[in-house]
Image (tube, rainbow, N blue to C red):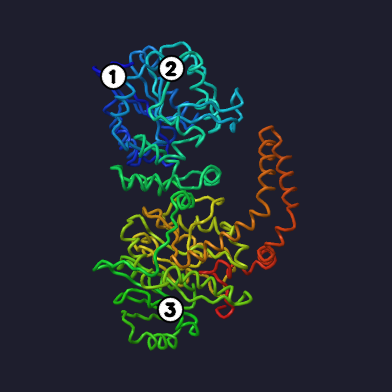
């Protein structure tokens, strides 16, 4: 027990790592919360630290150690402990090791320290990980993971720090070469190691009632810990956690529940989350964990605030679709601006006549037939977009390569219904941008019906490197991963906040920047820009997400449910058994053999699978056999139309 009536002589050792060496504001907020409770602080940074970051961290300590990014957090802590030596460390009542994987404080840390000061302990933490009956890291001498204090916060009392067992532990710390080593050799074993030697421990947040509910309450019961147990911290990882693991252990609600509770019911500034997340996390992870898929009403609208500047930029190519396309355009708020681009003066005259009498400020512009809808936006409308608060970009769409034509028309229907489905829907999309200052782009999701199913699970195709290089040309550096799906408007129809697109409009675009007709079926500048639409907002502090009208969401849910149920009914029991067998084999060291066995068995999936998914399998076959259909599938910028070539 620490003396609660006198100041506690407490040392704080903070471990920091950021791939870019940037210290975001959530870090200084965390340190500001802890600073009153430390007599002294040391900060260890693995890897680089930029000048601004160094200046920020130096406000908290004169002992700032920047070291090679080696040994993960464990050896960073060891470096700090070694810099003091055991004699100096013995002078402290308590030594606290904590790191930048946590955010807070949600509640004053004084509540936690005052509570724990009254407990007779040798070491303690904020949260614990419950016992796991197996060892996923293949490091534990017990064959399982013991319950343990999570290493994002360890507090060691003098009774432990001065013990030979503790000093020997750190003096003989083995090399830590991987995340698995860090957790498997240190974090998961530390608590049991010293508890078995008679040292008393506990955690501030009691999660004994969650035993059996989850192994990791800080991840899968985060809102409950904050709302019901006054947990003062939460994990950054909540917002980029591997979604396969999330769905393995939950229905996927934890991160959204946490964020909404923090935003609506606490004083924690959730802008701090966005600042770090949009700089450091992959957009695909954010979309999944925070469920950036928004279903908005299509029959009940929201008043649009006065003074908002709203525009529709629409490229019109097919005059036989003009009436149908303008019917969707009429969902825009009356009095807003239309910038309509066409490929000839003849078409311009026709469009002007059809728009006569519409309650909009109509500007019809003739553009060159080079660059398709991409040049229509970036050259035809260009910097004029920056005059507006919100812009909807759309274009007519005709897919003639697929038979029957209703397949391609379904893609166009999905795009239009989810961005211009009704006046009420449009007002609610604008309201979403109004209410959420982090929203930068909202688009329909990619199609998944009929022949499009063959591409639904595709990721970047041949477009990853080109998109990355194009973004770098714009000065954009955001987390990209070729193994994670691009978050982008694959039909190139979307709503956006022009402030989130400024790099696009600051560039001097020329028609010569775009490939001439006939266009490549894939891997062209048009395809790179189409995907870059989703990432330029991220670099400017905005997210890209997906939007559905409530009416179309009914269709989408039915489609996805049907496909998922059909897949599950035919394959889930078989695959589950095979995957478990594979994992067991991998843990026993038979990785290659197990993988080969898995894929061999996968090809023996029962005939009912192909019977029930015959149309889907055929669409995949057609896609492989006829790759030129790619643009008909993911069509916006590059959709192949022989009449345009």
Q: Which residue is drawn at 61% across and 63% down?
A: 453
x then y, percent, for residue 388: 31, 68
Counting from the top left corner in percent of width and height, residue 329 is at 40, 77
Instruction: Please identify the quadrant where the N terminus is shown.
Output: top left
Secondary structure of the residue carrying tag 3 is loop
Label 2: element kind: loop
Considering only order in the chain, which callout, 3 or 2, is on the residue closer to the N terminus?
Answer: 2
641 in relation to 466, above or below: below
Q: Quadrant of the C terminus?
A: bottom right
Q: In which quarter of the image is residue 145?
A: top right
Q: How many labels does the image show?
A: 3
Which residue is under mark 2?
A: 200
Q: Is residue 585 left or right of residue 113?
A: right
Within 10 Å of disc 3 (Cα), the crowding (few <14, some 14-19, many 20+) is: many
- Please tell me whether mark 2 or mark 3 is closer to you in this view: 2
Please tell me in which quadrant of the rendered image residue 43 appears. Answer: top left
Query: Which residue is at the front of the view, 632 or 514?
Result: 632
Specify whether residue 182 is in view: no
Residue drawn at (35%, 19%) of the image: 119
In three-dimensional space, the C-alpha distance between marks 1 and 3, rounded to whole angstroms, equals 73 Å
CA–CA distance between discs 2 and 3?
76 Å
In the rendered view, would you say 150 is above or below 614? above
Disc 1 crowd rating (10 Å Cα; few below 14, some 14-19, many 20+) is some
Q: Which of marks 1 and 3 is in front?
A: 1
Residue 630 x %, y %: 60, 67
Dot label at residue 367: 3
Outermost front residue: 209
């Amino acid at each position: 027990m620490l003396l609660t009536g006198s100041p506690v002589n407490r040392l704080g050792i903070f471990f920091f790592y950021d791939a870019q060496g940037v210290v975001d504001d959530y870090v200084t907020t965390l340190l500001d919360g802890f600073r009153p409770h430390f007599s002294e602080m040391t900060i260890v940074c693995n890897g680089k630290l930029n000048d601004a970051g160094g200046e920020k961290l130096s406000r908290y300590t004169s002992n700032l150690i920047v070291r090679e990014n080696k040994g993960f957090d464990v050896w960073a802590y060891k470096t700090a402990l070694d810099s003091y030596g055991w004699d100096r460390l013995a002078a402290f009542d308590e030594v606290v090791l904590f790191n930048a994987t946590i955010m807070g404080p949600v509640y004053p840390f004084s509540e936690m320290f005052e509570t724990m000061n009254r407990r007779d302990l040798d070491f303690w933490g904020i949260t614990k990980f419950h016992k796991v009956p197996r060892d996923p890291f293949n490091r534990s001498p017990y064959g399982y993971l013991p319950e343990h204090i999570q290493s994002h916060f360890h507090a060691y009392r003098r009774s432990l720090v001065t013990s030979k067992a503790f000093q020997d532990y750190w003096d003989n710390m083995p090399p830590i070469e991987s995340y698995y080593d860090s957790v498997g050799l240190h974090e998961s074993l530390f608590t049991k190691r010293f508890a078995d030697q008679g040292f008393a421990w506990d955690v501030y947040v009691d999660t004994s009632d969650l035993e059996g509910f989850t192994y990791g309450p800080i991840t899968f019961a985060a809102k409950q810990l904050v709302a019901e147990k006054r947990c003062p911290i939460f994990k950054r990882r909540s917002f980029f956690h591997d979604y396969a693991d999330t769905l393995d252990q939950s229905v996927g609600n934890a991160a959204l529940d946490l964020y909404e509770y923090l935003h609506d019911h606490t004083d924690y500034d959730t802008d701090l989350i966005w600042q770090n997340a949009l700089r450091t996390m992959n957009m695909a992870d954010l979309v999944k964990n925070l469920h950036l898929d928004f279903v908005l009403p299509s029959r009940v609208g929201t008043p649009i605030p006065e003074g908002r500047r709203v525009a529709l930029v629409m490229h019109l190519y097919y005059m036989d679709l003009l009436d149908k396309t303008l019917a969707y355009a009429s969902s825009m708020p009356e009095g807003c601006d239309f910038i309509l681009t066409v490929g000839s003066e003849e078409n311009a005259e026709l469009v002007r006549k059809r728009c006569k009498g519409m309650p909009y400020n109509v500007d019809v512009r003739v553009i060159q037939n080079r660059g398709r809808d991409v040049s229509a936006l970036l050259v035809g409308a260009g910097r004029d977009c920056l005059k507006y608060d919100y812009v909807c970009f759309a274009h007519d769409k005709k897919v003639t390569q697929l038979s029957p034509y209703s397949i391609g028309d379904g893609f166009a229907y999905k795009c239009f219904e989810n961005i211009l489905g009704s006046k009420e829907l449009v007002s609610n999309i604008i309201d979403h941008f109004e209410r959420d200052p982090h929203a930068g782009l909202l688009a329909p999701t990619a199609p998944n019906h009929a022949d499009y199913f063959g591409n639904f699970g595709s990721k970047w195709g041949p477009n990853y490197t080109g998109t990355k290089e194009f973004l770098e040309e714009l000065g954009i550096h955001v987390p990209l991963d070729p193994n994670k799906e691009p978050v982008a408007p694959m039909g190139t129809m979307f709503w956006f906040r022009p402030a989130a697109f400024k790099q696009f409009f600051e560039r001097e675009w020329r028609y010569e920047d775009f490939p001439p007709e006939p266009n490549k079926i894939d891997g062209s500048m048009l395809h790179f820009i189409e995907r870059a639409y989703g990432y330029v907002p991220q670099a400017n502090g905005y997210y890209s997400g997906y939007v559905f009208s409530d009416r179309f969401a009914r269709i989408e849910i039915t489609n996805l449910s049907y496909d998922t149920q059909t897949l599950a009914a035919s394959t889930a029991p078989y695959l589950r058994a095979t995957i478990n067998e594979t994992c067991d084999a991998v843990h026993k060291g038979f990785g290659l053999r197990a993988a080969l066995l898995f894929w061999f068995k996968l090809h023996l999936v029962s005939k009912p699978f192909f019977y029930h998914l015959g149309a889907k399998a055929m669409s995949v076959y057609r896609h492989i056999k006829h790759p030129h259909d790619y643009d008909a599938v993911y069509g916006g910028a590059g959709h192949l139309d022989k009449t345009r070539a």
